[in-house]
Amino acid sequence: ALSYDKLHFCDGGLFDDHLWVEFQKYLNDLGRDTVSHIDKRFKEFPRWHNQKHPNQVMDIAFTDRSIPENIVKMILYAAHNVVTEDDCPLGYLLLRCIRLYIEVDMYASLEVHTSDTIHEGRNVVQMFSVFLKQYINKTADIEDKGWNFPKLHMDAHLFDDIEAKGATQNYNMKPNEKMHGSLKDSCLLQTNFRNVAKQILRVNHWQLVAEDIHHRLSDINEFYCSQTQDRFDAADDVFDATDNTVIPLEDIFHVKVGSKQSPLTFELVENIFTVVTMHFKTCAPDSMIS
């Protein structure tokens, strides 16, 4: 990759594929009560805006990239007094690594940087590397986990990219990740599976055109409704002589594109549209008016 991609390097890479998998092993080793306790804490965790709230995290094997992003925000609070240094030294050391990883992710997520934030961010990256190296060395003889992969070393270039290209949101793949679903459906349902790129682009163009038309219709409908409402706000309700009922004007003119209009008598139309009544009487046959 030419730039630091926060989506695949952080939550969807280093944490989801490595730190979280390792930490799950220690939680499972502590017993079923510990696993249930962690899931219970996630379930009881307070909710806030734009925060996904997984109730069970210990058995999550495959998710979209937004789930690890939310797990990492809550795992420290859920496990800080469950995985202790006395009961599980390696798990506790890994939890300290996760805490430093959260700080790295926090600095990487800032939309505005100063010389101070970049300096502090570099220090946190260095501390994270030191603690993670300690964990790797202590577990080298215990398990066959390999830590030699590119995403582990990309943090060293994080703030070089920020200084050269700006905040990570400028080259983050997360905004485009949500398009995968619609593109997949287009490929599956509207192509012949040959030279799909041009076909998907054509379908995507159709979708954008349809969306533009929909927005234009919605805008003009909203405009006409507002004009009609302003015109008749001061008017009285209309009396329907066919069944001796009173019809509020707001019920008559709250009409959207595509909706079915209520039947209106010519007399009712004349009473409402007084501006065009004279023209209507002039042009219409006598048999229609009577």
Image: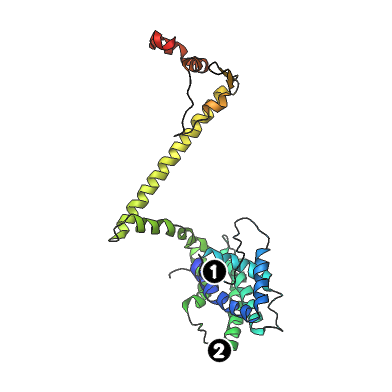
Q: Tell me the kind of residue under disc 1.
A: Asp
Is residue 104 something one can see in this rendering? yes
Name the residue type under label 2.
Ala
Residue shown at 55% from the left, 89% from the top: 140
Assign the C terminus to one quadrant of the image: top left
Corner quadrant of residue 134: bottom right
Question: From this viewpoint, which residue is outermost toward the front?
Answer: 243
* Residue at position x 47%, y 79% in the image: 149
Crowd tier of the residue under label 2, counting other residues whose Cα lies within 10 Å: few below 14, some 14–19, many 20 or above: few
Q: Which labelled disc corresponds to residue 11?
A: 1
The percent position of residue 8, horizontal first and vertical second, equals: 49, 69
In the rendered view, does 267 fall on the left or right side of 110? left
- Tell me if residue 26 comes above or below residue 208 in the rendering: below
Q: Please determine whether, in this image, residue 110 is positioned above or below residue 17.
A: above
Quadrant occupied by the N terminus: bottom left
> Any mark on residue 140, and which?
2
